[in-house]
Image: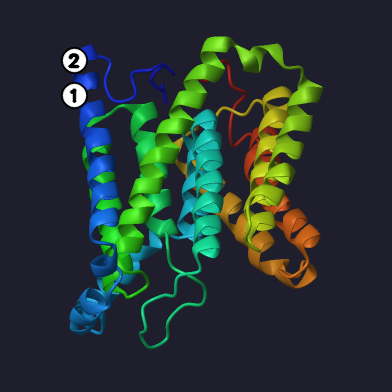
Amino acid sequence: MRLAPINRNYFSDEPHKELRWRILYWALALVLLAALVGWWDLLRTGAVVQALEPYRVSATGSIFEAINFVGNEEFYMIAIGLIFWCINKSLAFWASAILLFTASVSDSVRESTGLPRPDIEDQLDGYTFTSTAACTSVVFWGFLSSRIKRLKLWILAPIIIVLVSLSDVLLGIHYTGDVLGGLLLGIIVLALFLWFMHLLVKKGWSEQVSLGLRLLLAFVLPVGLIFLFTWEGAPKLMGLLAGAAVGYVLEGRLVSMDPRAKWYQQIIKFVIGAAVLFGIVMGLADFFPFDVPVLLFIHFALAGIWVTFLAPALFRFTGLSPVENNET
């Protein structure tokens, strides 16, 4: 898949359309901020959650449980693997980077604020502000839309974001204010990340860094971020990021798998890749206890390096994928 160039035109290559969409983008952010500031107490009451109780226990609730899966980590693991192995490696890696970073920011905010979840039966553990599902939906689908720049995706992305956000409220996982806060945080992080990628390309920093330094940064930066984020799951997400980053660097130098292949080879790659990935995540859980940060980091680093290095190496050297000439 050919991606749009990395530049300051995040929404459109036409300047007047780009300006219009930027104004709408930041106007939405201001509306969300104003709503949170002006109606905080109202948005944090259980009135909406209680009013939606009949829908939560009906077929509508089952539908929104399926929709909510699109905002869960299992979906993102599947999606990132699929994109990396079968569509575009660069797109998948940078989507995973912004996704994991944003999830860590959102979860750290949630742990820091310590606000309780809605009081419903069979409620999840943990705190509630901000909604990580809403936040990560914004950055994941927003990033894909910005890099691919296809009208169909620009239409699909906000629909998915809205539905995932609504599912959080309808299922009683979050208050309305938590979801609005997640959307606002996602908008801010996405804008900063796109600006950073543009700066990275404009300054040519990636070309100026040696292989050894790339590998060092790929490991050291996620480890350093563990000490910045304040919640117990940070080693898990940063382990995934470290493994994916180290694997991405090694894959580009040692493997160079072309994601493009025949349709039946794509199916085989995805089935093998996803099976091993979830085998690592779930099958090795007993050997890497969640309450031991170092082991948690190593466990998910293995998952990350499988996605970006070991699986591509397997596919490349078994003939399921050819060697790439040039990926854009």
Residue 93 is at least partly visible in this image: yes
Say left or right for 86 vs 311: left
Check the image and report above or below for 283 versus 98. below
Q: Residue furthest front?
A: 38
- Residue 259: numbered disc: none
Where residue 143 appears, as percent x and y from the top left, is 40, 35
Quarter assignment of residue 152? top left
Where residue 293 appears, as percent x and y from the top left, is 76, 61
Label 1–label 2 contact, CB within 8 A: yes
Quarter assignment of residue 325? top right
Quarter assignment of residue 222? top right
Where residue 103 appears, as percent x and y from the top left, is 51, 52
Three-letter code, disc 2: His
Q: Which residue is pictured at 72% across the width and 17% down the height?
A: 209
Q: Residues within 10 Å of mark 1 (few under 14, many from 20)?
A: few
Residue 259 is at least partly visible in this image: no
Q: Dot 1 corresponds to which residue?
A: 20
Q: Residues within 10 Å of mark 2 (few under 14, many from 20)?
A: few
Marks 1 and 2, how far apart at CA: 6 Å
Numbered disc 2: secondary structure: helix
Q: Nearer the viewer, residue 39 or 181?
A: 39
Where residue 249 appears, as percent x and y from the top left, is 70, 29
Check the image and report above or below for 270 versus 26. below
Say left or right for 141 vs 61: right
Image quarter where the N terminus lies is: top left
Say left or right for 153 vs 96: left
Q: Dot 2 corresponds to which residue?
A: 16
Q: Which residue is pictured at 71% across the width and 50% down the height?
A: 227
Three-letter code, disc 1: Arg
Q: Which residue is pictured at 31% across the width and 74% down the height?
A: 171
Say left or right for 238 vs 52: right
